[in-house]
Image: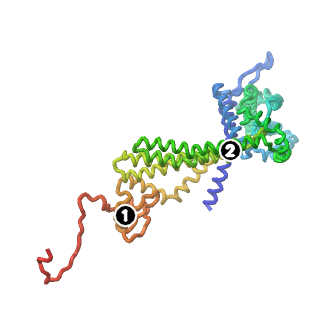
Amino acid sequence: MKTILFIILFSSQLFSNSVFWQNVTDIESQFFTVDAYSEIDIDSNTSEKIAEVRISGDIDAKFNAFKSLISLLKRQPYDVRSSQNSFFDPKGIDEQLFKLRAKIRINRDNNYNLAVERDQALMDKLQLEQEIYKFFSYLASNWTDTTVQELEDKLLAEKKMLSLIDMKAYKLRFAETQNSEEGSISEALHVNIAEIMMHYHFYQEFLAYLIHNPRVLHYESLLNQLRLGPIVAAINASSFAIDMNSYLRYIKLDLGRISLFMLLLILAWVIAKLHYDQLYNFLRNMIIKKEHLSDQMHLSNLEYLRKPIMILIYVFAVDLGIDILLYPNIERDGIVFYLLYLSLFSYILVTIIDNFVYHYLLKRAEVKEKQMRHELINLIISIVKSVVFIIAGILFLVQIGVNITGLLASLGIGGLAVALAAKDTLSNFFGLLKILSDNSFSQGDWIQTDDIDGTVVEIGFVSTAIRTFDNALISVPNEKLANAALKNWNRRQVGRRIKMHIGVTYGSDRQKLT
């Protein structure tokens, strides 16, 4: 039951929030906090307190925050449209507004004016959040093919919507409810107005940022960047292409784009072939010519990296080719290619680490105790490779919109349960560290304890494999070996003492016995 509960909690935290909207919330709290009010003159005889929004931080910091938000929107459009976020609930908004309208109607009938004002402010806040959510979702869905004029029209429409909000009235009411003694209803009204003002000023400044920096959403396809449009047009203008395009139009393609796609694949094949054979042979000859101790290391790296680099060339070519086939309406999340790139780069990095560390430290003999150092190196290599895979996994989770904060919170909540469940595993791992640090035995040593006698085959994370003299292979937990009274026959200094009992008869010849 506890395991099921932990899995449910872990899953709910894992997908509980959107990274994009968490950034929006962070920017609002950092730069647009409502925390002060000042006196203003209403007329010559009276004065009122009006709330002010603290625009904290310098302009460059806010500019960079907006820029990173746009970058995140372009990289993870699906994350922007996620319904699981801390900013706004698009699925439950209709139900929330319906309930609020019902409460307002009931409170108005009963002359609960303060409660009406509180609920109306909450409704205004939700509607403003809905408008912000819809705007960012629109950008996430259409930024690749929205024209400059369409974007300007959208921004002006949003500014017009904001201008309809009576922000001066909200500021006055916010100051009036500051330190009010009217109870929890007034306090809730105060909080709702503060959030409205924070959303308003954030949205207002962000729209101004886009109006003055429209190129941050400008997208140029591969065809535009490489000036391939005229080539496509020239191919499609031929009589053969015109006939073919009459059939290809049903799948929204044309001969010009298909020709460039095939040309790109052929070019990738030529580059991969040159890399796989010619460049490899050239580098191999250069390495052998040096006649250095590290030759084996470099040759091993070359051999292991040939195929993944060739695959990387093909993947990159297909990725660019798809952009060509989809031109001009290019809209794809690219998560598959992101995973392929991440996997290939991780494999290449792990291969380099594995070969470089092993050959450089062992073949170059830069350590004195080679046998024990061999095990330490294996441990270091395993840990480094695990770290690389963990980082790659985190990058992938971030890319698909998983809330890493929620993930870490889940791990913290379930950490105690995991630690208790893996108590023996952790004990064996620390037993391994004790074995390595004490240098009590190495691979290939003949060791003996009260109930174990054999040669060490491999020292693993959890257990040590030992080959007994009757040729059986047994696995012994590291914790047991680390805490046992252990005899290492390979560490004797001079010779070997063998104690034997030989029986002879009383009539044996003494000369023969000596």
Q: Which of marks 2 and 1 precedes in the sequence?
A: 2
Look at the image and tell me in which quarter the C terminus lies.
Answer: bottom left
- Farthest residue in the top direction? 44
Q: Nearer the viewer, mark 1 or mark 2?
A: 2
Q: Is residue 249 visible?
A: yes
Residue contact at pointers 1 and 2, CB within 8 angstroms: no
Count neighbours of disc 2 (C-alpha within 10 A) and say few if under 14, some if 14 to 19, many if 20 or more. many
SS label for mark 2: helix
- Farthest residue in the front direction? 239
Q: Amino acid at mark 1?
A: Thr
The residue shown at (54%, 54%) is 416
Please say if 34 is above or below 505: above
In this rendered view, identify the residue nearer to me: 289 or 166: 289
Residue 459 position by quadrant: bottom left
Q: Is residue 403 visible?
A: no
> Dot 2 corresponds to which residue?
265
SS label for mark 1: strand
Count neighbours of disc 1 (C-alpha within 10 A) and say few if under 14, some if 14 to 19, many if 20 or more. many
Relative image position of residue 2 (x, y in whole percent): 61, 60
Q: Amino acid at mark 2?
A: Leu
Relative image position of residue 299 (x, y in whole percent): 47, 47
Relative image position of residue 432 (x, y in whole percent): 42, 56
Look at the image and tell me in which quarter the N terminus lies.
Answer: bottom right
- Residue 455, which numbered label? 1
- Residue 62, which numbered label? none
Please say if 243 is above or below 200: below
Please say if 119 is above or below 304: above
In this rendered view, identify the residue nearer to me: 41 or 424: 424
The residue shown at (65%, 56%) is 8
The residue shown at (82%, 29%) is 149
How are the residues colored?
A: rainbow
